[in-house]
Amino acid sequence: MTRTILMVGIAVALAGCETLFIGSLNDCGGRGHKYVDIEYGDGYLIVDPVKTVNKKKELRFRLKGANRSDLGFDYNVADVETEGKSAGADDDWLNAKGSEKPDRFLMVCVDEGLEEKAYNYSVTVFVDGTANEISGIDPRVIVEH
């Protein structure tokens, strides 16, 4: 009986190692994902400046709208848009749009056929149908093998 319990325990532990070390299957034909945090609210927009991600992973833009606004905006339902803007590059794969509620994050696939290099993109927050964008943000994603 003790051996059976020990064997079941080892099997469960090894099954957990698949997702712990390699990552779980994703919608992009590979395993795992990488998060880019986007925080926004009254007068601020903060984006992780550089993220490195491997091909065939999900790139998830995690949306974090302010819970409170002195201007009366509900940032949880504000639309956030990412758009590729690398010169001469096919960077449409970075284009996504959604809101924190109900989406929580925007997901794009890092395709296996992408060139290994840095891709620039812009982030725009739309509050009450108007674009509230803070300039000077130049985030990028570096695609590796």
Image (spheres, rainbow, N blue to C red):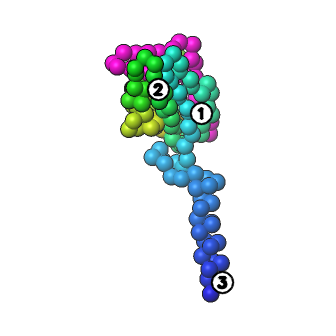
Highlighted magenta segment, given as a residue range: 118-145
Q: Is residue 4 magenta?
A: no
Please identify the residue farthest to the front as the structure is shown. 70
How far apart are the two marked residues, 3 and 2, measured between alpha carbons?
Answer: 56 Å
- Which amino acid, by three-letter code, is at mark 1? Val
Q: Nearer the viewer, mark 3 or mark 2?
A: 2
- Which amino acid, by three-letter code, is at mark 3? Arg
In the rendered image, which quarter contains the C terminus?
Answer: top right
Name the residue carrying label 3.
3
Q: Earlier in the sequence, mark 3 or mark 2?
A: 3
Q: Residue at image x 62%, y 73%?
A: 9
- Which amino acid, by three-letter code, is at mark 2? Arg
Q: Residue at image x 52%, y 48%?
A: 30
Chief secondary structure of the magenta portion:
strand
Q: Earlier in the sequence, mark 1 or mark 2?
A: 2
Q: Is residue 127 magenta?
A: yes
Whether residue 60 sits left or right of residue 21 in the image: it is left
In the rendered image, which quarter contains the N terminus?
Answer: bottom right
SS label for mark 3: helix
Residue 122 pos. (x, y %): 50, 20
Which label belongs to residue 75? none
Residue 71 pos. (x, y %): 43, 17
